[in-house]
Amino acid sequence: MAIQLTPTRIKGSKYLLIPKDLAQLLEIDDESILNLTIEDTGKGQRLVYSIREKSSNSTENSSHNAPR
């Protein structure tokens, strides 16, 4: 699956925003960690994002820090 994204400029930096529908389909939320790999190909560079599994520690920590 390929989609075309246009970079968004915020305070001098460029960002690729994930469309809401795609984020929901891939179950990407505020706790998700994405890794970016840049690969050289014969046609230029390829940006490859991978979604890292959420650790159980983050859910355990959030439950321990919840107000009682």
Image: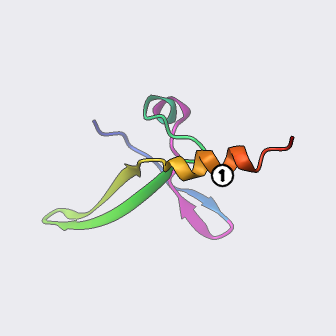
Where is residue 11 drawn, in percent x and y?
69, 67
Residue at (38% x, 61% y) in the render:
36
Any magenta on residue 60? no
Q: Please determine whether, in this image, residue 58 is positioned above or below residue 39.
A: above
Query: Three-letter amino acid code at disc 1?
Result: Asn
Label 1: element kind: helix
- Which region is colored magenta? 11-22
Q: Where the C terminus falls, by quadrant?
A: top right
Residue 22 lies, in percent from the top left, at 46, 33
CA neighbours of label 1 inside 10 A, class few (<14), some (14 to 19), many (20+): few
Q: Kindly identify the residue that appears in the image at 78 percent across and 44 percent down.
A: 66
Q: In this rendering, would 4 be left or right of 60?
A: left
Residue 49 percent across, percent down from the top left = 36, 53
Q: Residue at x 60, y 60 (%)?
A: 9
Q: Residue tagged by mark 1?
A: 61
Q: In this view, does 24 lie to the left or right of 42?
A: right
